[in-house]
Image (cartoon, helix red, strand yellow):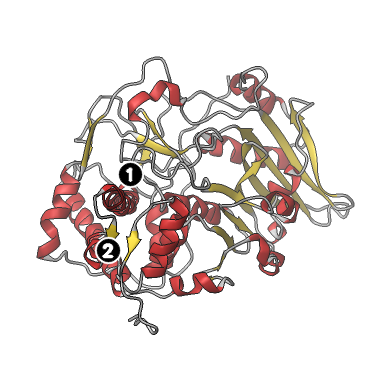
Amino acid sequence: MVEQSDRAPLLDWEEVPPAELAPTVPSPETGDSIQSALSSYPTEGGVRAGISLSTSPARPNSVTAVSGESAHSPHKHSGPGGDASATDEEGDCAFHGLPVRDRRIAGWEEKDQIVAVFVVTFDTRSGNMIEWCLPEDVNLEGVEFKSMASGSHRISSDFIYFRKGCYFGLACFANMPVESELERGARMKSVGILSPSYTLLYRYMHFLENQVRHQLQCPGQYSPLEAFYEDKKAVLPPGGNGLVTACPTSALGPIVNRCMHPEMKITHPAGCMSQFIRFFGEQIMVLWKFALLRKRILIFSPPPVGVVCYRVYCCCCLANVSIPGMGVSVPEFRPFFYINVADIAALETELSYVACTTEKIFEEKKELYDVYIDNQNVKTHRESLQPLLRLNNADREKYRKLCEQRQLLLYSQEVDGGCISNEEDLFILFFMEQNNRIFQTLSEVAASADPTLTAEHVRAMGLDPQGDRGFLVDLLEIYGIDVMLVIDNPCCPSHS
């Protein structure tokens, strides 16, 4: 059996954030409510229930709760270079506004579901090519370009998340100088895997990193990869399309969509969501609105692309809603992770997605996306969406509260060494609770005798009656919520 590691490499965030998260001291008026939310986290020794984006076409836009007692639950890094630790004791999963008791799901846990293992190499005459794979008859067309991003020859190593049909992939790339005229002084390879779900791929990052170095130094020695595949290969249901959700919904019953404690299950890097928000600053509120409206979001960045794959996942987390049944009629907000020109045909049929690319040509393919992000520059070519690029007072207030909550959490961790809550939990919960508040209010107004949405309702949702009017109109239309909006719409709304 091949030894596996639960530890994923931590990121070296080189980008300079636009601004430090501030202020540094929580304001008295928000302290009590924030402390109430923080105190509802599971106590030391409690389990952490997870929420992952479902990949099931039968349940679009669903949020699946995952029990924390699984032997394969992701370990949580205590910080950069810190040891990973996990807990298997039962505890409460209770959060501000919606206390939920964590329940075990008998007989279910996330299984190893590796459907393919492969090695990709760069040949100076033929370009990217699949050198070896198991099983031998698996369809890997296009994987040679997904697992070795365009422009990777300029860097020494990288990791890449991607989609291949109904599967998700993770590949680790490495570039080693060699004294060989035939290889033009460099040997480049990627070692990767395919799985029906991305939620467990992080567990094999360390193994793949070791194997790509091994393939560079000892080309053609595949026995460790063969042993790995035999140990981890999936047993897929006969006659199906191979698509396996993170957790069978039939086993979950009433707790589907109910637990409000998602995990960073993609790789669990320390500071992933925190750095994502620090990188974008107040612009995170713009991304949040586009995510909630299920827009097609494309992120451009030169290699390395691994960090940008994290941003794809973080964007998806901004749209989490835990109200049962909410959003089942809207397009699923799906992470495509890394894409290249070979994915153009697939993207033409997508109604909603988040993806990243290293290929600048995509910027010209405006029919493929609604929102284009280049570094920290968020833009849209759609005139109807351009007002959403402007921050209003409500946006800045939400960002201020987010910063205050972060500072309070850091203070709590410093004072109480036993605090197991982290910034990832705080950020994801912040946006989930914001989304829940919006949809709960809209649902209540729609079900009332007078389904009229007033300025008071809008303020109660944490939105700006004037600045967010267009956002609300789009939201009501996309989610099919039948309420009447009676907020004045001045010809020249002010956006401070």
Q: Tag 1, which secondary structure?
A: loop
In the rendered structure, the answer to whether residue 479 lies left or right of residue 23 reads right
Q: Is residue 157 above or below residue 233?
A: below
* Whole-percent x, y for residue 473 in the image: 41, 63
Q: Which residue is mark 1?
A: 78
Q: Which residue is mark 2?
A: 458
* Numbered disc in front, either 2 or 1: 2
Q: What separation in Å lies between label 2 and label 1 (alpha carbons)?
A: 39 Å
The amino acid marked with disc number 1 is: Ser
The amino acid marked with disc number 2 is: Val
* Residue occupying the point 69% across, 54% down: 348
Q: Tag 2, which secondary structure?
A: helix
- First of labels 2, 1 by sequence position: 1
State the residue in front, 43 or 58.
58
Residue 283 in view? no
Residue 148 in view? yes
State the residue in front, 338 or 250.
250
User: As drawn, which residue projects farthest toward the front?
Assistant: 449
In the rendered structure, the answer to whether residue 324 lies left or right of residue 178 reads left
**Crowd rating for badge 1 (residues with CA inside 10 Å; few <14, some 14–19, many 20+):** some
State the residue in front, 37 or 23.
37
* Residue occupying the point 34% across, 56% down: 483
Q: Quadrant of residue 400?
A: bottom left
* Whole-percent x, y for residue 481 in the image: 39, 52
* Residue occupying the point 52% across, 53% down: 312
In the rendered structure, the answer to whether residue 107 lies left or right of residue 142 reads left
User: As drawn, which residue projects farthest toward the top?
Assistant: 107
* Residue occupying the point 45% across, 57% down: 477
State the residue in front, 473 or 307.
473
* Whole-percent x, y for residue 353 in the image: 56, 52
* Whole-percent x, y for residue 4 in the image: 52, 29
